[in-house]
Amino acid sequence: MRFVDEFRDALPVQRVAAAIRAATTRPWTLMEVCGGQTHAIVRFGIYQLLPSGLELLHGPGCPVCVTPVALIDRAIAIAAIEGVVLCSFGDMLRVPGSARDLLAAKAAGADVRVVYSPLDALRVAEREPEREVVFFAVGFETTAPATAMAVHEARRRGVRNFSLLVSHVLVPPALCAILDAPWHRVDGFLAAGHVCTVMGLDEYHPIAARYRVPIVVTGFEPLDLLEGIHRCVLQLESGRAEVENQYARSVHAAGNAAARAMLAEVFEVVPRDWRGIGPIPASGLRLRAPFAAHDAERRFAVGDVGGTEPAECLSGLVLQGRIKPPECPAFGTRCTPDTPLGATMVSSEGACAAYHRYRRSDPS
């Protein structure tokens, strides 16, 4: 399969892995900030190909996982209102709120529907004008343009029964939050290729320069990841801290101009709480004033709804790269995909889910 099989070919993979081992002369710690990359690293055993002193940490790269408990509780509260259809991506349905999840709300009678695009939710609103249709908008910069397009179209078409519960977050401020933390030990980052496909590279240059850390934009297949690691190691070994683009087949330096323009028109940047991490300045998106009529939190007055995560759940430490999933006492026992304490165990991009699915021991 073009653009898949050749990036899993054992020969070039082994060749790049050997180059990494030859280039590494001292311990380094790298962090990937993409749940898809985390799953590939664990699934394909990338860590087994690396020298012992080169450690990979898993950062807050799963947008489902960092969606605050309070917003999930608000989604459940909105779904319980008579006449409301709550539309969501499927991977949000089993993410626990403070007391239950959206799947339990659906089982209790709420009209919760899985959609593949926010535009699908807009079509539901057009087909069922007597219902209030709310789209639970979750994701990084990758999915935010489609959300922006949906609400832009709703306003243009005069669809008044369509609104958004917005939980879009931004990657660069999260990198800064990690690098500003007193406990951080990150020497370099593997940045998410799909985010940069939309946003380009401009936001990462100031971070690399300010914190003196290399940032390599990387794809999601084994060869992509190993090439990204190799570039990062070469920079560290030579004392450089630059932004490089390993994923050039998809990422252009300027990103997607049309998508960025749509984001700028519809959303403004605001502080945002990240589940298990806490507030990060300028790390979220909110609808601008012209689109405020489509803000579900305002429309349904649920801004005060929200609980807390179980104290036993250590997913926040996992998301910050402070521990690996098997270091959590509840991992694989009291916390499993069937009985999750936190989002990182049930999300398709969660680190705990990756470790549970592919192996239980610590692959560091």
Image (cartoon, helix red, strand yellow):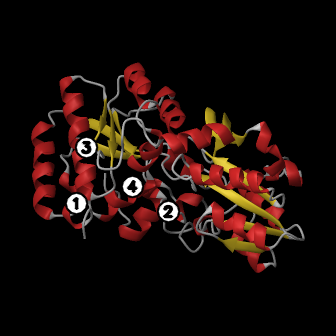
First-in-chain label (3 vs 1): 1
Percent position of residue 66, x then y: 59, 50
Q: Amino acid at mark 2?
A: Phe
Q: Amino acid at mark 4?
A: Thr
Disc 4 designates what residue?
Answer: 38
Q: Residue at x 78, y 56 (%)?
A: 163
Q: Amino acid at mark 1?
A: Phe
Whole-Å distance between the Cαs marked 4 and 1?
Answer: 16 Å
Disc 3 designates what residue?
Answer: 229
Callout 3–callout 1 Cβ contact below 8 Å = no
Percent position of residue 278, x then y: 64, 39
First-in-chain label (4 vs 2): 4
Whole-Å distance between the Cαs marked 2 and 3?
Answer: 28 Å
Whole-Å distance between the Cαs marked 4 and 2?
Answer: 17 Å
Percent position of residue 239, x then y: 23, 22
Secondary structure category for the residue under label 3:
helix
Disc 2 designates what residue?
Answer: 331
Disc 1 designates what residue?
Answer: 7
